[in-house]
Image: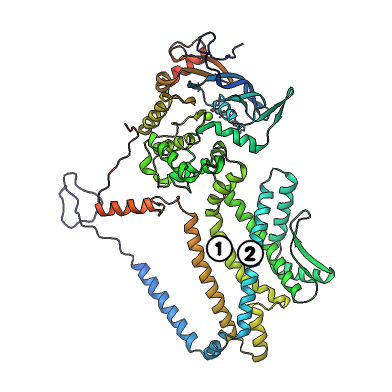
Amino acid sequence: MSTATSAPGGTGASTTDPIVRIIDLHKNFGPVEVLKGVDLEVRRGQVVVILGRSGSGKSTMLRCVNHLERPSSGTVIVDGEVIGYRIKGDKLHELPPAAIAKQRTKTGMVFQSYNLFPHMTVMENLIEAPRRVKGVDKATAMEDALQALEEVGMAHKADVYPSTLSGGQQQRVAIARALVMKPSVMLFDEPTSALDPELVGEVLNVMKRLATSGMTMIVVTHEIGFARSVADEVVFMSEGRLVENGPPSQVIDAPVHESTRTFIDSIL
Amino acid sequence: MKAVTVTESTRLDPSATPPSELVPMRHSGRALAALVILVAAASLGYSAMTNDNFEWPVVWEYLFHPEIMQGLGTTLILTGVSMTLGIILGIVLAACRMSENRVLSTLSGAYLWFFRGTPLLVQLIFWFNLSALYPRLSLSVPFGGPEIAGAATNGVLNLWAVAIIGLTLNESAYMAEIVRGGLLSVPRHQSEAATALGMNRWLTFHRVILPQALRVIVPPTGNQVIGMLKHSSLVSIIALSDLLYSAQLIYSQNFRTIPLLVVISIWYLVCTTVLSYAQSHIERHYGRGVHVGVQRPGGLAKLRSLGSRLSQRSQSNDNPNPA
Ligand SMILES: Nc1ncnc2c1ncn2[C@@H]1O[C@H](COP(=O)(O)OP(=O)(O)O)[C@@H](O)[C@H]1O
Ligand SMILES: [Mg+2]
């Protein structure tokens, strides 16, 4: 009953088809059900911010979108493709790992802990996947990389190793690394949670510019200010369910559900 | 309280300015210890050079003796081949040990338990005697794969096979643990990041995980190579003419035991020194990106560092918000 359905019904914004569709997603870790039937639609160019307590299943949901986690049941559709499966008759057949790997190029992911490759320079981090996964030639890959680095203000650090960069700089490089794959949607899992407070702003600024440029984004974050100013839709998640969704003015400033209200109060 | 000129204290009057001259602590104990050790070493060296039992002229005579040279060759080939096979088998064993397949991981664990739990010398004698019972011995890739090394059980070839099998199987057990430790040292997030970028399992392994694991794997592997060079002398027990056995053959006839042992010790030392030198170079290669301040010595970086050294001006143009 409290399971939220797709974007607010009848807003008239459905002229574009959803680029991400999550349908009745369940995920169990052993006997524990972490996702208990999640439905979510994200349209092209939309920024969806997911709020929720630690342990409510936000990361797990995000990781199901690019199949880092294999859903126990339910379907994830990105850009018209069922992730992880091939439809054959009335059955879903699991795809081989190589095919799933290819599907992942449609989604870019940014992690809390940046996860740059420490043995590669910034430039090498950025051209690795385009060259080896997409087969882009080196010159083109480097051109794309330099452009992406300029977008995040890191072009002057192309030749250094990640360990010489601050957390904020590393995260901006990680964003650029995801962008050079030209994904249809960007997934952010608490991108600023590991950063010193004074470095949060530079990463959020990069994300704001990305949103303005029309990138579709699903962002798990506790940055209410960012949610208020950038999100088209805010989703509140609790104990494996989406309990409330809507524009920031509604979910953040006038939450309907008790659990949402308690959570918003606790982080403001 | 009044400030006194000659006091020794860590306290400073709040209004006073601390003196600016720094006097480093003197390590007089270290200098003394170094002196004692130097004197002891010098006297030891002097006694060795002057003691007639060392028979230095005999040492020079046999240093490049053809049989010694041949023994050195045998030792080097044995080390190279056994180590290479041991590393390959070790990687396979580590992969099995880390596999989710319980049968594979248990079998691999049992293998390590046996080969690390019994002395190499016993294993060598065991293979030597076993070879007498079988008409043909072969080492092959598991599950009906191609033969890696094989030999009929008579002739010199057989001795080589026994030695290589014995050294390889023993070495692989140690290498398996070294490789496993290296792979485990790479944070799980690294493979997740690679996977999220669309890299498949092979790309993730050999472009992201292995290069980072090698930083941990290389130093102990260097030790293993050096260890193997010396352990290979155990094959003299099965009469394969390695460096030690060649010397034994010579001194069993001319009874110049000490100088011949000195000769082969010199060769062992030469080899281990060269290996240590190579090891430190390889370590530096795989340590890149880990030590802060390391820049890839590529063209752009070289030019930049040259430029900044020339201009002596470090400017920060780190701008998160370009126009
Ligand atoms: N790989 C895993 N194995 C077992 N339990 C897990 C695993 N990943 C997450 N969980 C559990 O699932 C729940 C939801 O986790 P997560 O999705 O990370 O929450 P959030 O990101 O909202 O903090 C937590 O209780 C967590 O302990
Ligand atoms: Mg999380």
| Residue B38 percent location from the top left of the image | 41, 76
Which three-letter amino acid code belongs to the residue tagged 2?
Answer: Met
Q: Which mark is residue A53?
A: none
Crowd band around label 1 with a 10 angstrom C-alpha radius: few (<14), some (14–19), many (20+): some
Q: Quarter-wise, where is residue A59 in the image?
A: top right
Q: Disc 1 designates what residue?
A: B222
Q: Chain of mark 2?
A: B
Q: Chain of mark 1?
A: B
Q: Residue at x 73, y 69 (%)?
A: B161
| Residue A265 percent location from the top left of the image | 44, 17
Q: Answer yes or no: disc 1 within 8 Å of ligand 1.
A: no
- Badge nearest the viewer, 2 or 1: 2
Q: Which mark is residue B83?
A: 2
Q: Quarter-wise, where is residue B200 in the image?
A: top right
| Residue A172 percent location from the top left of the image | 42, 36
- State the colouring used for the structure image: rainbow
